[in-house]
Amino acid sequence: MPLPNPNRNEVSLELGSRKFLARASFNFISQLEEYFNIPLTQVVYERLPTGQLYGKDLLVIFAAGIEAAKQEYSEDDLKDAIDEAGVEASIYEAIKLIMAAFKGPQTNTGKKKN
């Protein structure tokens, strides 16, 4: 797996013993909004804090991020990784990926910090 590039909103997902490169791109956001049929902000502020996620939701979130990073995966491998990681760790990784969409790319502005 290549190292994540924060300038491209990429994160490393750790699901059990497996690692995946994922990216919070515009297409990632669009796929999630279409799947959940609500804005991504509602997913973050209403669904995630209450744990209202199904197994299929985790699969869709991870698949959208991995596809956005142009990485190969199989649905069966991703399901096995979610099983291995467990629900709590999988939700944490999903939150990490979704929050990368809000954080934006980490770029060097050229300004010196005091």
Image (cartoon, rainbow, N blue to C red):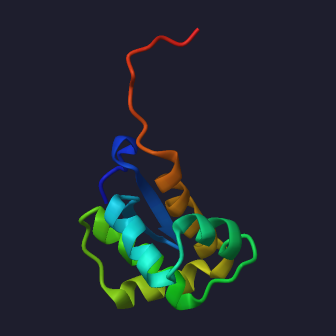
Q: Closest to the observer: 67 or 89?
A: 67
**Point 68% across, 66% down: residue:** 45
Q: Which residue is at the front of the view, 32 or 24?
A: 32
When asked about the image quadrant of residue 77, the answer is bottom left
- Evaluate whether residue 93 shows in this view: no
Inspect this view and state whether residue 26 appears: yes
Q: Is residue 94 left or right of residue 65?
A: right
Quadrant containing the N terminus is: bottom left
Q: Horizontal and vertical percent for residue 76?
A: 37, 91
Image label count:
0
- Residue under the image location 41 percent in, 42 percent down: 105
Q: Give whichever of 59, 98 is nearer the camera.
A: 98
Kindly identify the residue that appears in the image at 40 percent across and 43 percent down.
6
Residue 53's quadrant in the figure? bottom right
Q: Is residue 103 above or below residue 51?
A: above
Residue 98: give x, y in percent of width and height. Answer: 52, 62
Above or below for 33 versus 69: below
Residue at 50% of width from left, 61% of height from top? 97
From this view, report whether residue 36 is shown above or below residue 30: below
Residue 18 at x, y percent in the picture: 44, 71
The residue sitting at the front extreme is 38
The picture places residue 114, in percent across and down from the top left corner, at 59, 8
